[in-house]
Amino acid sequence: MKYHFSLTFRVNESKTVDVTRVASEMSGSDFHVEADPLNVTEFSVHFDRDGDHAVDLLNIAKEQVLRVVPNAELLSMDMTDELPMMGVVDDITKVVIQACTVFKEPELAHMWLSKPQAELNGQIPKAIMVDAEGRTAVSKALNHFKTNSSG
């Protein structure tokens, strides 16, 4: 079975991650290293592997990253048999559909998702939907808006 892996790390707050250097120093050509666009101290490593020993594969990749970035702190390790990002895209799509349902017009939903919202501490909904916590916050804000506008 082919698995898709993602490991997310954080480095000391006074450092930024040079993802090009990290990628070039990891053995294997299929590692994709990306910086977190919202947090310069975090980065993720994505790769695919065939095999039945998924936990071993995750640990080997973690060790490779720690050899390149010794002080990195592992934040999460994820494994799926789905293509990378498909679950995130599906989740974002669900929130966008929810917004369209709440506002009854796609243009109104788009405007709401694109502007800072007080109930999200002034954050822009579509900007915080990149992670699960942000999508949950946006969904809750939409539910709150729906409840207040229908009551």
Image: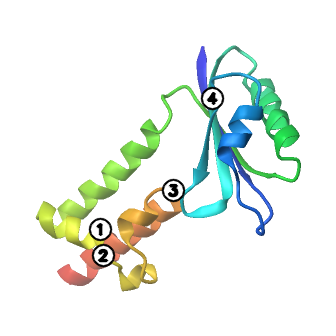
Q: Which residue is mark 1?
A: 113
Q: Amino acid at mark 1?
A: Leu
The residue lying toward the viewer, choosing from 68 and 1, is 68
CA separation in Å, label 3 and label 1: 16 Å
Residue 71 is left or right of residue 141, and the answer is right
Q: Which residue is mark 2?
A: 115
Q: Which mark is residue 132?
A: 3
Identified at 80% across, 63% down, the residue is 12
Kindly report which numbered mark, 2 or 3, lies closer to the viewer in this rendering. Answer: 2
Q: Amino acid at mark 2?
A: Lys
Identified at 46% across, 83% down, the residue is 121
Q: Earlier in the sequence, mark 3 or mark 1?
A: 1
How packed mark 4 is, by other alpha carbons closer than 10 Å (few <14, some 14-19, many 20 or more), is some
CA separation in Å, label 2 and label 3: 19 Å
Q: Which residue is mark 4?
A: 47
CA separation in Å, label 4 and label 2: 34 Å
Q: Earlier in the sequence, mark 4 or mark 3?
A: 4
Kindly report which numbered mark, 3 or 1, lies closer to the viewer in this rendering. Answer: 1
